[in-house]
Image (cartoon, coloured by chain):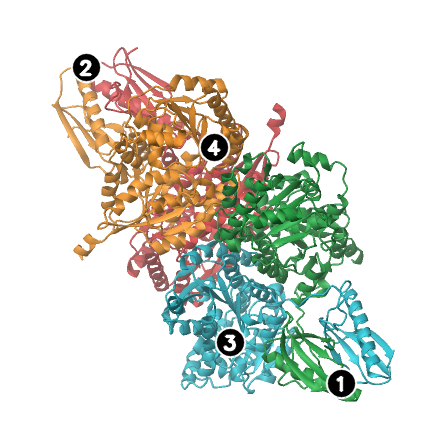
Chain colours: A green, B cyan, C red, D orange
Amino acid sequence: MEENKATRKLRVCVATCNRADYSKLAPIMFGIKANPDEFELEVVVLGSHLIDDYGNTFRMIEQDDFDIGSKLHTIVRGEDEAAMVESVGLALVKLPDVLHRLRPDILVVHGDRFDALALATAAALMNIRILHLEGGEVSGTIDDSIRHAISKLAHYHACCTRTAEQHLIAMCEDHTRILLAGCPSYDKLLAAHHRDDYMDIIRNWLGDNVKEHDYIVALQHPVTTDIKNSIKIYELMLDALISFNKKTLILFPNIDAGSKEMVRVMRKKGVEQHPNFRAVKHVPFEQFIQLVCHAGAMIGNSSCGVREAGAFGTPVINLGSRQTGRETGENVLHVRDADTQNKIYHALELQFGKRYPCSKIYGDGNAVPRILKFLQTIDLDEPLQKTFCFPPVKEWDISQDIDHILETQSALAVDLGGTNLRVAIISMRGKIVKKYTQANPKTYETRMELILKMCTEAVIDAVHLNCRILGVCRQEAE
Amino acid sequence: MEENKATRKLRVCVATCNRADYSKLAPIMFGIKANPDEFELEVVVLGSHLIDDYGNTFRMIEQDDFDIGSKLHTIVRGEDEAAMVESVGLALVKLPDVLHRLRPDILVVHGDRFDALALATAAALMNIRILHLEGGEVSGTIDDSIRHAISKLAHYHACCTRTAEQHLIAMCEDHTRILLAGCPSYDKLLAAHHRDDYMDIIRNWLGDNVKEHDYIVALQHPVTTDIKNSIKIYELMLDALISFNKKTLILFPNIDAGSKEMVRVMRKKGVEQHPNFRAVKHVPFEQFIQLVCHAGAMIGNSSCGVREAGAFGTPVINLGSRQTGRETGENVLHVRDADTQNKIYHALELQFGKRYPCSKIYGDGNAVPRILKFLQTIDLDEPLQKTFCFPPVKEWDISQDIDHILETQSALAVDLGGTNLRVAIISMRGKIVKKYTQANPKTYETRMELILKMCTEAVIDAVHLNCRILGVCRQEAE
Amino acid sequence: MEENKATRKLRVCVATCNRADYSKLAPIMFGIKANPDEFELEVVVLGSHLIDDYGNTFRMIEQDDFDIGSKLHTIVRGEDEAAMVESVGLALVKLPDVLHRLRPDILVVHGDRFDALALATAAALMNIRILHLEGGEVSGTIDDSIRHAISKLAHYHACCTRTAEQHLIAMCEDHTRILLAGCPSYDKLLAAHHRDDYMDIIRNWLGDNVKEHDYIVALQHPVTTDIKNSIKIYELMLDALISFNKKTLILFPNIDAGSKEMVRVMRKKGVEQHPNFRAVKHVPFEQFIQLVCHAGAMIGNSSCGVREAGAFGTPVINLGSRQTGRETGENVLHVRDADTQNKIYHALELQFGKRYPCSKIYGDGNAVPRILKFLQTIDLDEPLQKTFCFPPVKEWDISQDIDHILETQSALAVDLGGTNLRVAIISMRGKIVKKYTQANPKTYETRMELILKMCTEAVIDAVHLNCRILGVCRQEAE
Amino acid sequence: MEENKATRKLRVCVATCNRADYSKLAPIMFGIKANPDEFELEVVVLGSHLIDDYGNTFRMIEQDDFDIGSKLHTIVRGEDEAAMVESVGLALVKLPDVLHRLRPDILVVHGDRFDALALATAAALMNIRILHLEGGEVSGTIDDSIRHAISKLAHYHACCTRTAEQHLIAMCEDHTRILLAGCPSYDKLLAAHHRDDYMDIIRNWLGDNVKEHDYIVALQHPVTTDIKNSIKIYELMLDALISFNKKTLILFPNIDAGSKEMVRVMRKKGVEQHPNFRAVKHVPFEQFIQLVCHAGAMIGNSSCGVREAGAFGTPVINLGSRQTGRETGENVLHVRDADTQNKIYHALELQFGKRYPCSKIYGDGNAVPRILKFLQTIDLDEPLQKTFCFPPVKEWDISQDIDHILETQSALAVDLGGTNLRVAIISMRGKIVKKYTQANPKTYETRMELILKMCTEAVIDAVHLNCRILGVCRQEAE
């Protein structure tokens, strides 16, 4: 019995929806497949992988020699958000049959797109464990709501950055179920950094005359909460790139609402025929890495710019709000309101050809081994029911327990030295919300008592001010 | 222009899925309808409202004289979780057309059921503002994941209890968008408390011989993450009730996976024909209030037991895990592992006929006016994009800012007096994770410095121990 | 290669939606399974098989030891026609994934219900061959439209009666793809006719005091195009049965719109508690056969009454329009406008206890072997594209060809002059199928008589040659 | 009451799925809108109308100033037949809500595409009358099955050609519900024939140097039952057109499975950049008419080639099997197995620049008035249930009735003896529809000749009386 349990393999189902999430999931899939004694792998393919306009990228998965257990059409055509919702619906109508058939112990989903929300919803309601990759990040778009909603449905989290980890903890996810793994694509990325044949790849995509650090990679997606503006930015970017007059590899936007309009803009400007440009729907990930690694600059609003490019120190110009709030290395220059061609052109001038130090914010190259080890520790006999780790809530008006300084979100700044004891409630954004000052007692005991009293008072006020005090910090005497 | 804006009405769409959520939404709907100068009301009906087996409760809405803008079949038949997922899918396929047609400024959704997740997903992806009712609560079931996921998608929250509010804040929702309203059903509940004709109602449902405080109301739903056990509990409850030999009004379980099996159990035991029992599918809410208010006890796992019943001080026996973690008044006796008939019978003996003081945890009777006022303050020109209020994250290894004692979840307990300075990392659950002891320096300054040093050390360790330090509390000298 | 092809097995997918179609499909499934050298069997289960209210009849299939390749929830809840349409939609959304996975050479579907239309639509559009059972029949309801629509989508037809066969030919289906098989359930039916233990079965369902030919089997379904009236008839039938005062086994109606209301009527009349009645959701088919075979009468509007009951000569009272137009044996008494209790009661008096001669309209007990043989003849290399056999159309106003008396599909060519009278059956494509020659009588009257006789003979032969004679044309003397 | 009924307007819902069906439906919609005293118009838009890749053609409908009552995304992405099935499913899931809301008396659907099947299925199951346009035609593809299945579901038929009408009758549709209307697009077509500004239009699309009768219009769609071959043909057509070296307007293929691949072939050959070619997604119908009318030739497999082009006598080269079996004028040259570039090139040489006489097979320009009049005659009080007109079937082996020569739908009764030769058309129900009497000639030969003449005459009349003669029987002398 014991033995039997020990040898039981974990059935892991990896669901992939598009080339972007596959670049993160593939390293894990290879890892799982390389350990057949411990894991069984099932692969479910859905979303834009199966769409010709997006390169029929399910073929990549077949070429990588994975058996695809189910291919599901889940995209409803239509150029607006309604079609996105309906696509989630379509996926939810179809997924139960597949999950029923494959009966995975755990489903691995990635990211923050609508397809991932469908996967997480299906699995959560069907009592299937979920490992979510890339939770806790912040981009400043509708994706945030989706990503955090997925986190709430997921049972386990493998996140990429320290900040993401702390966000998950802050949102009351159980820290014993959070793994700070780093980004799986970085494993390959950092490994593949110094490949010899990179010039062949670059020439293959951009022609024989192209030189290292002397071309641009452009990739701009629509922002679904602000489609009109994102098309405008796209147009300005194209104008700026045309003027900037460098060889440019431009990738087609993803499938989100607004993408068709972007393609139309691109065609109107004759980009596909322009001698400086090479417009493509898909570049295999390893080649794409090389292209980004050796580019003079990368431009657009792709997550690749703020994430992967940092690992190589490639200069990036990030346009608009899509990556607002993302952690980035110093290689990224943000052009948030990209409202003139000049602004973008100027940013290109500033960045093009520079080199930055490499950043490891998003990973140190060991994500996959960490994730595999984490998967192995999952105890299937443990109850499936999630526990959310809320801070213990005290009813201040009734509680006798005034010994707490606090568990709260804002901070109490305490100035311990000088003539006065000073306590202040300071908001997350650094603003002083309320101040308290008292003459500093002489003795240590009275001082401590007074501090505690002031803190208690501040904490009570904080509740009425709709703050939560998360800690106490000492304020330097001014 | 200004004027125009001032007079513009807020288009509010209320979506209701079943009799339970309607009991919370109806008071708001009446409130909206009573203010035609400020609001336009649209009503969307879906889910089990339209199902005969659940009483075709959409008729209640028609009887309340609301115009139903759309009735959507969204329930896929099937007695398992898969059908639930598919039902979410079906709703998502259909909702965009309705939302497109009705174009609400804001969608009001309630609770934590799969239908509500569908509504929130649709609205969030379609950039329609969402007001979510009853967020932040904790029941200890799969419902928690759904409820919190909905909170992540919702733009505004009207919650019922102080604890719920603090949970929402803790999960990093923007506190300026959280309203502590109380439960809307309490408005009516408290108003209807002292109705004269209550004995007529009771007799109407339970026969002429029934007496006040001398009958039982039973309502037990399946727990979808533990169907088998919840059917077992149901069976034991029926046995206990049959032995207990009091007039009992028993309501059919809701539509969740497992309900069919429960009905079968009920039929097998002949409950429908039993002279002590009255088995019904639906009781109008006002009558149900009276029945609960004057019952000798309420038994089961309905949220009504832990919520509404408290307002009347009616004794409640809460069976199993479905309401685990719910805030309750002292009137609730939990029988968590209801694994024998005796245990349940004993609980009935303990509770039956008692009276408890009324509790206002779930509302003070003014929820609807608060919610209407809150709706009026919504600025449609404000960006739709949600802001999540994460605590500012510091990179401890690079940060120069060592003055912070911390923003963390676990607590550092600091013993300031005595021979030794003692610092400990204490987990949320009160366990000491790690201890630090140093001889207590003599002077105030050195003490403070040492404390800070110890705390800093502890904080660094905490990260490696996978804790987060949320505050510092003084530990009493032992 | 040749050899390989010879040994290739035909992959047959049988899709079953409810207990009714399973009673026809099961004999074929057993037949296929018994020939593993020639067939591979896949079973897809959908529709009301998976619904608790309808007896979770998928378990019958499991008990019959078939592997179920896919179980699909396809029923959308709702008590109206809209839900039926949505159920078709749900099935169509899900079926392609299943058909893609199972890749059958041929899909076997049965009957005229909405689920069968979904199956036929999916397979036809996906270029999968379809064998349709029970095409060509006429019931006089909306089912006719669906059944004939399925015939148009199906590539092969196995029909039950001679009339059905001729209807299919008349609707221009290719007669080479029509098999007059008889009803598969008759194979079992006729075999099981004289079972010894029938009284045990009858007593098991109707109590120990019941006698042969002294009880009633009642089964009335809603008519979706006239729900209100069919509920009325149901009510009158119940009243008549209560008055008639005989032991009665009453089955719950099927899942169609209106069924819930019927169940309500039944409950209101206390049928479930009535000592004369036994109300059940499902009776295993073999037992049901025995119950019908030995009943004093069968009443309702079930197809079983007009079909299976005839095989035993059991008297049937058929109520309302649901079976209008169905071929029946003389054992059936139609009460088309069943608008008073008296009328139904009177019909019961007329029929109860009678015995009729057995009828073989619907089958001779050899349907399954015929169907299996037919399946084996299917040439998968033949183009999938259906050919519809329209009569050749002539533009009368321009045609020079006035020798034709009639336009023909097959024609009888009649040579009136010369020494011999000659008649021939000529196919649409001009080929002579069969010739008849007789010496030409002298007188006009004898000639005419002989011609008529020859034509009659040719027409009879034509049926056996699978031709249909659409006209007679004069053949020029050669 | 009477009066009220007289003035009640017929609520007609027209559902349009793509630019092709809109070109047939629009004339009817204009007609309905022009008669507001008799009709109310509702418009439902679905299918590829709402897809950017197909020109977002719903805008045409808005520009034509029709109110669109509902826009439904119904296309599931995917490049195969499965996606088509799922699209039907999606439409069926959504349509009931719309039909419920609009409550039309009659739904008008057109043609033979999967979207139309969805519409017909929804309406038939929801007991909504259906008028189907273009039933009874034959193309020799999977479309035939769909078209005939729709005919079985439809309650009324407005067909285009005499042959189509006879096919519908042959398939046992009720001839009183069949209207031979002609194609509605012909009304406009024939009216617009001699427009003065046609050269402006031609130059606008094909450049200033183009001359009348000196350019080609190319339009080739995929054949879903033979995708691979149809892509091959497409490639060969492009090669032939490139060699043929004439100005060519080429339209993108429709949305069917295979179209993406075709577009890829087109791009690979550089057609979009080729100076002779103009590749476009959509041409407004009136302009398209002019372009076809004055073309040197039209090539491809569009129904427009075999239908509309005939009205102008424009030479057409029809490639492959997609229109196999369609009725065509003499202007069409079929290249069924278009397996070499040479064959196609040769066909272009044969046809280019020729002129043919105009054909009215598909319409005389009065379809719309006929259809409106037909709609007005629909009696909503008549039962919805369809009657299928099967020929009465006789069991030959038992029938004593050997006087029949043939079984009949209508029969010609022939009285051979007596003073007069008498022929009569007798309906299925035994009513004499029309009588013919002639003095009986003396000799056998003259008698036979006269009989044949009378029968021929009767058969011609029968067509005008909307009967079909299925046989001849001898009438006994009275």
* Label 4: chain letter: D
Residue B155 locus on image (x, y percent):
53, 65
* Horizontal relation, residue B33 to residue B366: left or right: left
| Secondary structure of the residue carrying numbered label 4 | loop
* Label 1: chain letter: A
Number of residues whose C-alpha sits closer than 10 Å to that of mark 2, classed few (under 14), some (14–19) or many (20 or more): few
| Secondary structure of the residue carrying numbered label 2 | helix
The C terminus of chain A, quarter of image? bottom right
Query: CA–CA distance between discs 3 and 2?
Result: 100 Å
Q: For this rendering, which residue is in front, B173 or D245?
A: D245
Which quadrant would residue A276 be assigned to in this image? top right
Identified by mark 4, the residue type is Pro
Question: Residue at label 3?
Answer: B183
Q: Is the residue under label 3 in contact with that under label 4 (CB below 8 Å)?
A: no
Query: Of discs 3 and 1, which sits in the foreground?
Result: 1
* Label 3: chain letter: B
Identified by mark 3, the residue type is Cys
Query: CA–CA distance between discs 4 and 3?
Result: 59 Å
Same subunit, labels 1 and 2: the answer reads no
Can see residue C331? no
Question: Residue at label 1?
Answer: A448
Same subunit, labels 4 and 2: the answer reads yes
Question: Residue at label 2?
Answer: D445
Q: For this rendering, which residue is in front, B71 or D259?
A: D259
Residue A144 locus on image (x, y percent):
59, 59
Query: CA–CA distance between discs 3 and 1?
Result: 42 Å
Query: Of discs 4 and 2, which sits in the foreground?
Result: 4
Query: Of discs 3 and 2, which sits in the foreground?
Result: 3
Q: For this rendering, which residue is in front, D141 or B53?
A: D141
Question: Residue at label 4?
Answer: D222
Identified by mark 1, the residue type is Met
